[in-house]
Image (spheres, helix red, strand yellow):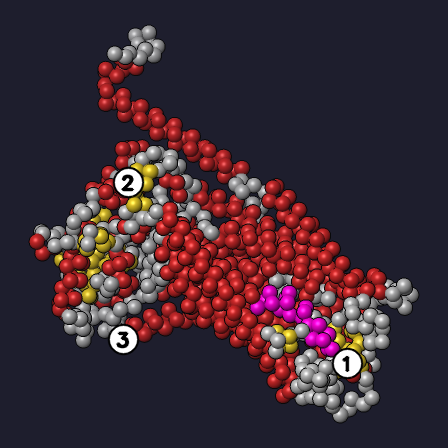
Amino acid sequence: MTAENQDVLLEVEEEEEEEEDGEVVLEELAQTIVPSYGTAPDQQKLHTSEWAEFDQKPDSLFFNDGQRRIDFVLVYEDESKNENRKKSVNKKQMRKRQAYESNLISNGLQLEATRSPNDLKTRDSAFNWFSRLFRVDENIIKPEQEFFTAPFEKARLSDFYIQDKDIFFNPATRSRIVHFILSRVEYAVKDNVKKFGINKLLDSGIYKAAFPLHDSRFNRQLEDPNCPSERYLLYKEWAHPRSFYKLQPLDLVRKYYGEKIGIYFAWLGFYTQMLIVAAIVGLACFLYGYITKDNCTWSQEVCDPNIGGNIIMCPQCDQECTYWNLTITCESSKKLCIFDSFGTLVFAVFMGIWVTLFLEFWKRRQAELEYEWDTVEFLEQEEYIRPEYEARCTHVVTNEITQQEEHVPYTAFGKCVRMTFGISAVLFWILLIVASVIGIIVYRLSVFLVFSAKLPRHINGTEAIQKYLTPQAATSVTASIISFIIIMILNIIYEKVAIMITDFELPRTQTDYENSLTMKMFLFQFVNYYSSCFYIAFFKGKFVGFPGDPVYWLGKYRNEECDPGGCLLELTTQLTIIMGGKAIWNNIQEVLLPWVKNLIGRCCSAARSEKTIPRWEQDYHLQPIGKLGLFYEYLEMVIQFGFVTLFVASFPLAPLLALVNNLLEIRVDAWKITTQFRRMVPQKAQDIGAWQPIMQGIAILAVVTNAMIIAFTSDMIPRLVYYWSFSVPPYGSHSSYTMKGYINNTLSVFDILDFKNESKPVPLPGLGNQTTCRYRDFRYPPGHQHQYEHNIYYWHVIAAKLSFIIVMEHVIYCVKFIVSYVIPDVSQKTKSKIKREKYLTQTLLHENHLKVMKKNMGKIADRIWKGADGTFRPKFD
């Protein structure tokens, strides 16, 4: 059956706009809601919306009278024509909707209803000349006029610059006002519990959609000169692919979508600009490693048939694994020389300082935006309590500051219960991720046996497949892919859990709600995305014992070992797969899915042409924005920020990949919200919220992780110890410092007769009279009085690693502290502007107040105010 949809067009009454500010209006409306409305609508005289037929103007943004602007659209299905539900259910939903709309009219909104024409289915420097090339043409998008601003009050209407009362509040502000009212008007009372808000009506299916209108089609400018066609301008100068090199028109983004969307794109653009420097330095370090890889002495020894060709390595698993020749790892050792070079150390130190500069300069940029967008005092003055919180305020407590009674949704004990439940649930899911990581580790340990048994067993490793597809490489790649799939699945499940927990906690304001949800989601994502990288970097190959006494997981699985060159290359592989796979998956979700859904919706709808249907119905075809808005966009970028900073010592190209991805991400996000999604409800925001302290925490942790990667994952410290201490007497035999002999010196010797029965490998033909094999560790050889115990080289290396970590951390932390102290969070220029505006605002309001007093009090006020001799003489009774 095809049901018809109704569109309810909402507008704030002009009389309200003329007298009052949006915030003040909303406060008064919230206080005048009729508490019993919706209980028995059949017995009350309900206000009804005006009915009007479609005026055949597909791009109109006004009611049929052409005067009143549409601020919001509500879409519902005609209950009388819905045969899929019982008549009693339809009647009940219709009563709730009618009561809700009647309350909207009572609270100052004007409604006009129209029937859909079609059946729809639900769904300034010396470089100005250079920078001008990247700016948006000011003749196309004109710069915003600058005014000194102050919180609006109806009592001071004459103090504000109002040229036209109809456009004093821009469309974004009007939509925000209407949405505030929609979220708080009730529609029913059941068991003395009020039911209110458009969100619940949407969830219950009484309304199909609720959204503000786009002001035009994205690909065609309106002919009406009174309509600015801001959506078209945003698409042409911002979201279109050919504008990828241009700076973002942030003022227009903020004007059209609100401050919350604007500050996200401002942050993303700033982050991308800062990545340019990091990408250049990282690319330079990569090229340095690539150019010098042929001079890598230890890699040459691995590939030398007279050195690496004569070294037989011990099996890395029990029984199924066999002996193998060191030259098998020749290709991986060459690749490792690119990433495990001196340039890596320089780049790790640079990134520790870069991340501090990024965060400090962003604070300054954010302070400028707070001033320019008038959100400096937003949280203190304008943020309202969430309607879900207000609805549960049944307990009375005494405010410690005001000593007045106020209502709260729960007692102190109830708050503790909610927090305990929330923390427990988060910990449970984190432990679930840890369990999945352990499962991946068990997979790696077990499948390594299979690959070792199936891949060719020739110890010389001359076949091409064995050169590139070693058991270690095959295990690493397959485990990384499986890990990525598990990450994606757990993300989908945990999203619903995190929202449920946060809803149960019942935060007071929307900012509190988003911050709470952000922390939960990030903790989960941190463990989900980074756990496998932490395992490879700091645990794999670190606790393996030696061939005669290996360490076992769960008493069954033998611990993994790294290649002779270490686990750094495997960590690089893991980062590449996760970062690349994540970027591809996100782009598929963000681009293809909305486009395909909209395409299917248009094809399945009887409305084949946008030219024959009104503006609100065109927008109804678009995809609805999720309840979390830009939350996942932030999360995606902050997770990327973690990859770029936490493990950059293993992958200096990470900033370059992030830069390329972000250049695409900005335009993809812009294209998506401009062309594929309904217009979001504009929201104010002062900053990026909880993401700021999260990035600061990542920046602090990044210093430790990169220092530990260089110390424990790479072979830089053992090579330096060998070069400066063990290549020359008394420990070495060379007359000068050299890297020759490093491989032979760092591979310990094991007697094959010392294998335990359960781990003894099957002997292979061609092994000959070989009685020993080599393994990666620093231990005394068989026959020594301390055989198989750690030798002096090991303790030198451990001391050097710990010293390096302490020195590197302290140096970088000192530099970070100095940089943070030297760079103020708010520039002096911005501080002066803020102080100047406050001074002028206070002066203006004070003087105007005095003028009004003098005008109203007349001659009596003049005689009181000024004596005959011109002096001030107040008189009191």
Q: Nearer the viewer, mark 1 or mark 3?
A: 1
Marks 3/2: CA–CA distance: 45 Å
Q: Is residue 539 magenta?
A: yes
Q: Is residue 693 above or below residue 119?
A: above
How many residues crowd mark 3 within 10 Å: few (<14), some (14–19), many (20+)? few
Q: Foreground: 5 or 233? A: 5
Residue 576: x percent and y percent?
58, 70
Numbered tag placed on residue 604 in the rendering? 3
Q: Nearest to the eye among marks 2 and 1: give it.
A: 1
Residue corresponding to mark 2: 24
The residue to which callout 1 is attached is 754
Could you tell me if residue 372 is visible in this image?
no
Amino acid type for the residue under numbered disc 1: Asp
- The number of numbered badges drawn on the structure is 3
Q: Which residue appears at 75% of the width and 92% of the height?
A: 765
Asked whether 490 or 296 is in front, the reply is 490
In primary-sequence order, the first of circles 3 and 2 is 2
Residue at the image position 70 percent from the left and 56 percent from the top = 805
State yes or no: discs 1 and 3 in contact (Cβ < 8 Å).
no
Q: Is residue 313 above or below residue 871?
A: below
What amino acid is at disc 2? Val
**Residue 472's quadrant in the figure?**
bottom right
Task: Find residue 739 and report its horizontal and vertical position in percent.
Answer: 82, 68
Q: CA distance from mark 2 to mark 1?
A: 85 Å
